[in-house]
Image (cartoon, grey):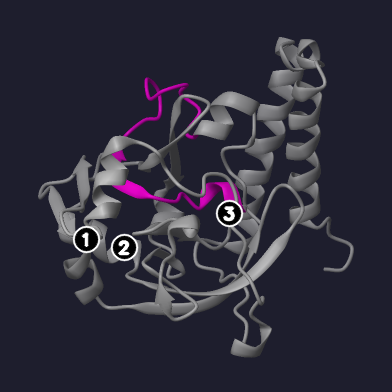
Amino acid sequence: MSALIDRRRLIGGIGAGAGGMLLAGCDKLYSQPTFQKMLRDAEGLHYRSQRLISGGQSLAREYGAADRSPVFRSNGTAMPMTSEYQTHLKAKFADWRLIVDGLVTRPLAISLPQLMTLPVRTQITRHDCVEGWSAIGKWAGPNLSTILQQAGLSSRARFIVFHCADMIGGHPYYESIDLVDAFHPQTIMAWRLNDIMLPVANGAPVRLRVERQLGYKHAKYVMRIEARDTLAGLYGGKGGLWEDQTGYAWYAGI
């Protein structure tokens, strides 16, 4: 196992390198069809290899309370400035609802108090950012699978999409995962961090924790969960804002 390439370093290097090339004006390389195909093929190979080697239910490492980072830093948006989010924030999310729709038989609109009554999973895990930093935090919230089961997921569903309240560069933030990760026991909709209600900077009122993937997949400020059979036709069609805008891998498994 020691001979295996560290996935965190590998995907971090690829992502940082791609982002660096774009910022440095080297997008001519990225725009080449052969280069794009190479990245897609590499991502597909890793995705298939990860599923084959680790299986669908292998767990991310969990830590003890003493291992928690003194500060769990915020990354990306720290305060969504959309009028809808600001209205919810001023009302302390009293009228906020988590919408669950798409390919489900029972669409849901879950209030924060209702979300908090669902069975809670607590886990202390490490968040690995594509930028190269990590932090360990204690998260709590219901399993995503519990919510999807209540909504009655259609057999046609293949992807779960998270629509968020924040905007980056004028584009709505969104992310997506497959059903293997959606039903993984460590995939939760967290409303608590380190034994307090989730701070705004970390994604209040609720964020996704998908512990076997890199940090940009852990969508903050989730407003809507949509079940879909395809990612085609959704924004840039690549399954997430960073995937659409920078070429980050859709599958960021670690």
Q: Secondary structure at mark 1?
A: helix
Sort mark 1 into few (<14), some (14-19) or many (20+) by Cα contacts within 10 Å.
Answer: few
- In this picture, residue 93 sits left or right of residue 142: left
Quarter occupied by residue 151: bottom left
Give the number of the disc on residue 149.
Answer: 1
* Residue 29 position within the rendered picture, expressed as x and y whole percent measured from the top left: 80, 14
Q: Secondary structure at mark 2?
A: helix
The Cα–Cα distance between marks 1 and 2, rounded to whole angstroms, is 6 Å
Residue drawn at 57 percent across, 33 percent down? 242
What is the quadrant of the C terminus in the image?
Answer: bottom right
Three-letter code, disc 2: Ser
Q: Is residue 165 visible?
A: yes
Q: Which residues are magenta?
A: 215-240
Sort mark 3 into few (<14), some (14-19) or many (20+) by Cα contacts within 10 Å.
Answer: some
Marks 3 and 2, the one that precedes in the sequence:
3
In the rendered view, would you say 41 is above or below 122? above
Three-letter code, disc 1: Gln
The Cα–Cα distance between marks 3 and 2, rounded to whole angstroms, is 19 Å
Q: Nearer the viewer, residue 168 or 51?
A: 168
Three-letter code, disc 3: Arg
The Cα–Cα distance between marks 1 and 3, rounded to whole angstroms, is 23 Å
Residue linked to disc 3: 51
Residue linked to disc 2: 145
Furthest toward the right, the residue is 3
In the rendered view, would you say 140 is above or below 250? below
* Residue 143 position within the rendered picture, expressed as x and y whole percent measured from the top left: 34, 68
- In this picture, residue 141 sits left or right of residue 63: left
Residue 28 colored in magenta in the image:
no
